[in-house]
Image: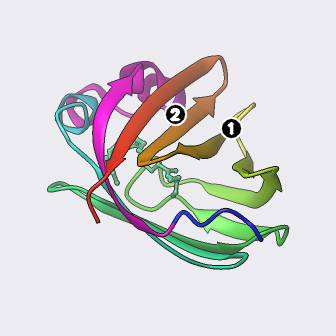
Amino acid sequence: MPANYSGTWDIVDNENFEGYMVALGIDFATRKIAGMLKPQKIVEQDGDSFNIKTLTSFRNYTTSFKIGEEFEEITKGLDNKKCQTTVNWDNDKLVCVQKGEKKNRGWTHWMEGDTLYLELKCEDQICKQTYKRTA
Ligand code: YOG
């Protein structure tokens, strides 16, 4: 049985989001707005099938995937790039690789009780986010 990430999660910590956004090539004005946001994640999971919504007052972003199946991800409303994306289990961690223009791009999720962790990486930057379950 894989871990179940389903739930509603609110951000409580966001370390080096600025560096991650710079690495993605996000312009200054957009970074200033984005840096103020308090994203909420809504995860719907059925076994190896996922729908992850990242919701904010500025923009929303949704991705759907099945574990181990590469798909074309368009990061619409983020840096607007095309990636060949694959998400795999590493024990109970979710490990995403986003192949595309940017080197070393991807993210990892893991859970400890009612805390959800997310590390986002791009090139030499790592952003560390922490979320608490609210539903
Ligand atoms: O999540 O890949 O949970 O997709 C990363 C924002 C700000 C837009 C959000 C809107 C990167 C302007 C998605 C922020 C910054 C700044 C919320 C993170 C880019 C543009 C939509 C992500 C995964 C894992 C699932």
Q: Which residue is under mark 1?
A: 105
Give the mark nearest the N terminus, 1 or 2: 2
Q: Tag 1's secondary structure?
A: loop
Quadrant placement of the N terminus: bottom right
75 versus 118 height, above or below: below
32 versus 107 height, above or below: above
Q: Which residue is under mark 2?
A: 24
Image quadrant assignment for residue 29:
top left
Ligand 1 neighbours mark 2 (CB distance < 8 Å): yes
Q: Magenta stretch: residue 8 in it? A: yes
Q: Is residue 41 left or right of residue 121?
A: left
Q: Position of residue 26 (x, y in %)?
A: 39, 34
What are the residue bounds of the magenta stretch?
Answer: 6-30
- In front: label 1 or label 2: 1
Q: Is residue 40 left or right of residue 117?
A: left
Q: Which mark is residue 84?
A: none
